Image (cartoon, grey):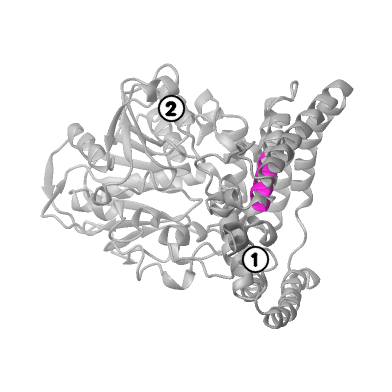
Amino acid sequence: MPDQGDKQDLQYLVKDPEALAQNLARIVEEAGKVVAAYIEPREKGKMKADMSDSVRDMVGALGQVGEYWLSDPGRALEAQTRLWGGYLDLWSSSVRRMVGETAEPVARPHDADHRFKDPEWSENQFFDFCKQAYLITSRWAESLVDEANGLDPHTKHKAEFYVTQIANALSPSNFVMTNPELLRETIDSHGDNLVRGLRNLAEDIRAGEGDLKIKQTDPTKFKVGENMALTPGKVIYQNDLTQIIQYIPTTEKVLKRPLLIIPPWINKFYILDLNPEKSFIKWAVAQGHTVFVLSWVNPDERLAAKTFEDYMIEGVVNAVDVVEKATRQKDINIIGYCVGGTLLAAALAYLAAKGDERIKSATFFTTQVDFTYAGDLKVFVDEAQLDALDRKMAEKGYLEGKSMANVFNLLRSNDLIWPYVVNNYIRGQDPFPFDLLFWNSDSTRMPAANHSYYLRSCYLENQLSAGEMTLAGERLDLSKITVPIYNLTAREDHIAPAKSVFVGCTFFGGPVDLVVAGSGHIAGVVNPPEKNKYQYWTNGPTGGEYDDWIETATETPGSWWPHWHQWILDKDDQMVKARKPGGGRFKPIEDAPGSYVMATS
């Protein structure tokens, strides 16, 4: 009778060589289509290679790490000995397993690492060896960066990021011959999965017009205005930069203070109105808020000169004027999300400098106003990279939406890139329909002037928190913002890290209530009470260190949405008769979600 090991080996034997041979011929044919999809737009001059600056930056950062270790023979020998010592331990452990002895793994994946969950990664000696060799090597490479003394912090940060990206790309889980799941699927389908995968790859390169545009979801399952962004409302105003949507009330009475939401211009506003079950906007309307939302335009070359100041004046400040006129109410509650929140903070400081007191409370969703601890996005911000970016944006007057989308995906490449590479191009499967990832791929362009100013003034020079930013003739001072602030951060946020938001709280001049949501930048915000998912933490003042604050914070299960609504009521719970969109002062232009959000990049 064959033992368990024999059974394991049999599952990797080719069962139909003829079918496999036929599919190998099809693989060659599909590979040719992939090459053609990549080359054609370059031959026609529709695009040019723009990887040189990125590659140069990566090589430069990693080169400085290598120089540190190679400049001292003793140090280089120590590093090499450490790596080979890990390999020898793995070899010794593998030999003991081969002769039937029990041997503990030399390297184990972290509990949160889902790449190696298949039992064969541990039970099959070949795949176990591949896994452990990879872990030993990648952790050794990370240690070289961590222990490279004398590097400036920015270069070290870049080197850490690039080593992580390289390690993620070279994981044995990404290749057929070193991943037991993929090898089984390939053998069972006689290679048909690879044929389908190459077909998907060619389609995605064509969709990216020569660049790979990885599908993270099935885009045919979603359409804005049909099964997304469904909360009833009217566009009551528009200018070059924004449409302003006022939502139709669903209660007989509403809070006296209207609510204005400033979403990020880097993404589309309907993240807050994905569908009726996940819509913060719909929920807020049901709680009695008169909700207004900015829908930013998807800019083209005609708006290349629009600045951060223009976005503040023509976007935020103008929207406050519109809300006041539409509701005949001077006291307004306001929300800013991500970079929309950064813009809102600038606008609040500007209004404070002008003596404008219409904003009575401000809420920030995952917003940075100080960029000292801005996380991995700072990897892409230094003078050399920004100069290269400025040259690139000057060609069209804007940054392509896919460029920012690619950067955000790189921040979590093991979640947002490699699982889809494996699923789409090796397994040959279509991605699962997921509304959040459809929104994530519905990217927007960035006007050159605005984007350049934002990156330089905030990420590179940190002007806003330093009181060095001047807009519309006013020097902005966050300490002059004295309205109550509800500052929401997310514990696993990789775009606006919780520590960064925590530090930012100290720059405001009024009372700040910090709330830390479970999960990340999106799921931590879009967390309806009915789902009863995640949790949130509250505590006292935000002085001191974030780690100390969160360690002693009170954890509450479920959504923070009701907590925020109560916070709003505590400031002013007066009710008035429900308001119609436009209030008789603006004639509705079109139904929500409006036309600006429909424009694709």
Q: Residue 27, how many percent across, how many down?
A: 71, 76
Q: Which residues are magenta?
A: 126-135
Task: Name, please, the residue furthest toward the front.
Answer: 1
- The numbered mark, 1 or 2, whose residue comes first in the sequence reads 1
Local SS, label 2: helix
The image shows residue 207, relative to residue 515, as above or below, that is below
Which image quarter: residue 545? top left
Residue at 51 percent of width and 29 percent of height: 370
Q: Residue 312, how many percent across, how many down?
A: 46, 43
- Real-space Cα separation, disc 1 to disc 2, in angstroms: 52 Å
Toward the viewer: 188 or 219? 188
The image shows residue 138, relative to residue 327, as above or below, that is above
Queried whether the magenta region covers residue 127, the answer comes back as yes
Q: Residue 291, how many percent across, how many down?
A: 27, 51
- The residue wearing badge 1 is 12
Identify the amino acid type marked 2. Phe
Position of residue 253 in the picture relative to residue 599 (left or right) = left
Toward the viewer: 326 or 467? 467
Identify the amino acid type marked 1. Tyr
Task: Name, please, the residue furthest toward the top.
Answer: 544
Toward the viewer: 32 or 579? 32
- The residue wearing badge 2 is 502
Residues tagged 1 and 2 counted as in contact (Cβ below 8 A): no
**Considering the image in quadrants, where does the C terminus appear?**
bottom right
Q: Residues within 10 Å of mark 2 (few under 14, many from 20)?
A: many
